[in-house]
Image (cartoon, rainbow, N blue to C red):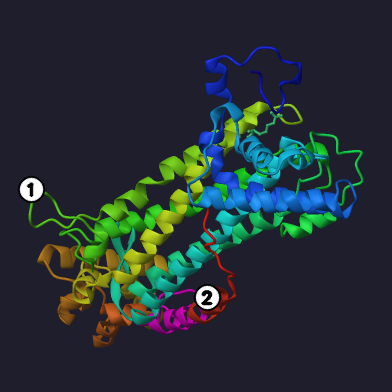
Amino acid sequence: MSNRMWGGRFSESPDAIMEEINASVDFDKALARQDIAGSRAHAAMLAKTGIIATQDAEKIGDGLQRIKAEIEEGRFSFSRSLEDIHMNVEARLAELIGEAAGRLHTARSRNDQVATDFRLYVRDALDEIDGQITALMLALARKAEAHAGTVMPGFTHLQSAQPVTFGHHCLAYVEMLARDRGRFADARARLNECPLGSAALAGTAFPIDRQMTAKALGFSRPTANSLDAVSDRDFAMEALAAASICAVHLSRLAEEIVMWSSAQFRFVTLSDKFTTGSSIMPQKRNPDAAELVRAKPGRIIGALNALLIVMKGLPLAYCKDMQEDKEPVFDALPSLSLCLAAMTGMIADMQPNEAVMRAAAGTGFATATDLADWLVREAGLPFREAHHVTGRIVAEADARGLELAELPLEVLRKLHGGIDERVYDVLSVDASVASRTSEGGTAPGNVRERARHWLSSLQDAAKQTADPGQGRL
Ligand code: ARG
């Protein structure tokens, strides 16, 4: 039998391979909830505008509710010969309510239908991700407040550079994640226009009310151009671009956690909940969750690439190529959600080892810049000369196997006569971090203040987030 939905002019059934390459229901059933919501809004609009009878719209609405329940309860049988989620739902509707089902597709095409469903899916995913980023930022801000004065080595080139506070380090990620949230919010705002009513590509002659369906589905407005609406997927690209950047941020934190939790660093201890043991080496506590978060950008950036390449060079309007838009998104956005959840758990449970970090902060001549700055301030040296003198002091300390604060005053004075005992005030790691009071600097007072700023604004944001995890089918 030829296809029930579009087979009018066909006499033969598709080849088995054709069915295999063409069918998308195995993956686009993830759009079921959005598809049903879109169809309900469309049917209600068709009735309100008098395009279909109210009784038919009611039957359609009831039938769609039953189908939703069947899918949610795993009682729905998806058929590949019906190609995709849209036709699976419509065919089942016909089984349930008969002739009225055939009226649902009036003034609509699968092209505007799938564009609408996919926007709804991405929007749901972005809302979930927004709530999860907020939760991670809160976990980091809590650690930052608790450790505003916990000294650790700050690195450049992964070499000890200057002491910083652990709280400051945590807040660096909070700032990155805040920008990620901003990128997702921007993407959401641009995404939030409703394609429904664009029909196949040119709009429709039926007197539809696009404002009504847009509003019913929570969109800000209908899209302005039917060709654009059915054929662009930039909203998904943008979501994946933001997801890629966020995943890269998470992977950097993940890498630091892997390093920090190693026996060589011992800066933090991870909880049992986010580590695994080794089947052969009993001493091991492996940071698997952090390693996986470190790895996930591979697939998330891969998804962005895949979608960009699918869309590149496609003529307007809809092309079947665009069916390849979904799997990358269905893989990447839930992967990012999982990374955010795992990272939030790891951060909340993580125990910083303050003594180890403090000891490490004092090694590697980490207060050399403080010494140079002191020479500028107290001995009146130009910075370049102070840098040079400090370099010689570091070489002397290195040769003696001492840290800067351990060098006797007479040794320091031999290298520069302007030095007096007050210099020791700046050579300790605590004095170093306490002096960094410039805006955005690592001084504990700054860190505490910024952590509190985030805690209060994020707690408000978390309260306002309306049910972020509605869940997807
Ligand atoms: N499954 C299709 C997709 O995901 C739905 C749209 C089909 N439209 C068409 N004209 N064949 O792209």
| Residue 451 lies within the magenta run | yes
| Residue 361 lies within the magenta run | no
Within 10 Å of disc 2 (Cα), the crowding (few <14, some 14-19, many 20+) is some
Choose mark 1 or mark 2, whichever is in front: 1
Magenta residues, start to end: 434-453
Against 406, residue 327 (above or below) is: above
Q: Report the residue at 48% width, 64% height from top.
A: 132
Name the amino acid, label 1: Ile
Closer to the camera, 283 or 46? 46
Is most of the magenta stretch helix, strand or loop?
helix
Q: Which residue is mark 2?
A: 458
Total numbered badges shown on the rendered structure? 2
Closer to the camera, 59 or 16? 59
Quadrant in the rendering for residue 411: bottom left
* Residue 280: mark: 1
Is 384 positioned to the left or the right of 223 in the image? left
Q: Where's residue 223, x and y in %?
A: 80, 48
Mark found first going from the N terminus, 1 or 2: 1
Q: Report the residue at 52% width, 66% height from top.
A: 131
How far apart in space, not on screen, are marks 1 and 2 (Cα)?
43 Å
